[in-house]
Amino acid sequence: MCGRYAVAGHVPSISLLLDGVEHRVELDLPESGNLAPTMQGAVIVLEEGVPVQQTMRWGLVPHFAREIGKYSTFNARGETAATSPAYRRSFAQRRCLVPCAGFYEWAKVEDAKKKVPHFFSLADGSMMMMAGLWDRARIDGQDLLSYTIVTTTPNDLVGQFHHRMAVILQQEDWGAWLDPDLNDVSVVQEFVKPLAPELMQERVVTL
DNA sequence: CCAGACGTTGTT
DNA sequence: GTCTGG
DNA sequence: CCAGACGTTGTT
DNA sequence: GTCTGG
């Protein structure tokens, strides 16, 4: 799962390989130590072939919706996103990157009243890029952009805490995930797998 | 045919 | 306990 | 995902 | 918009 994550305040510039061409994206990420569903988050989408940062609502409102529903769409199961009515068009044509510092999982502790948050980030401290889907809906006469984070089975590290985990893309896959020409769903599906646990680190935090 | 759903996680 | 809002 | 609310009538 | 259930 991924229901809360953190976005670093510093401004890294990232590099994407799209169709053999390198693109640099200047990021200006608003700092957030605890981003929650329904809040505005920064994602990277392709705009006329160029990767750009874009702010949208976390919690995908499908193109066919006419109002922001009560459904839980902050995560999309990678196993079914390709065929589910709410996500399939986005899975095939509207993928995005969700940059973050890391995400949280809460663990229940014996005799403790509150659950304890654990923070998961990349072992080398670099920016984490989660696999996202986005969509555009017409709500009250206005375009609403929104996104969701794709989930999969956990690796051995995250699996100690939860049975679902966000899909985390390695840098060499960032461009391909964004590429609209890559619309063969079975190829996209290859990216939906847990990141190797040795590439991640975990620590207890307070929020 | 029309009406209504379209989602995830976690917990039981 | 369960729903809503962030 | 977690945190916080969860209710009504009437009066100011 | 498209599929499912009635």
Image: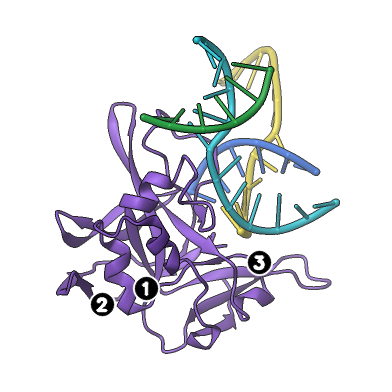
Chain colours: A purple, B cyan, C blue, D yellow, E green
Q: Position of residue A77 (x, y in %)?
A: 54, 55
Q: Which numbered disc flags the more N-terminal residue, 1 or 3? A: 1
Could you tell me residue A28's position as x and y percent?
A: 24, 67
Q: Which residue is mark 2?
A: A12
Q: Amino acid at mark 3?
A: His
Q: Are marks 3 and 2 in contact (CB under 8 Å)?
A: no
Of residue A151 and residue A9, the one placed in the foreground of this image is: A151
Mark 2 residue type? Pro
- Residue at 15% x, 58% y: name it: A49
Q: From this viewpoint, is residue A33 visible?
A: no
Most foreground residue, A9 or C3: C3
* Label 1: element kind: loop
Q: Are marks 2 and 1 in contact (CB under 8 Å)?
A: yes
Residue A85 in the image: above or below residue A134: above
Marks 1 and 3 share the same chain: yes
| Disc 3: which residue | A163
Gap in Å between the C-alphas at discs 3 and 2?
31 Å
Q: In what element is the residue under mark 2?
A: loop
Q: Quadrant of the C terminus of chain A?
A: bottom right
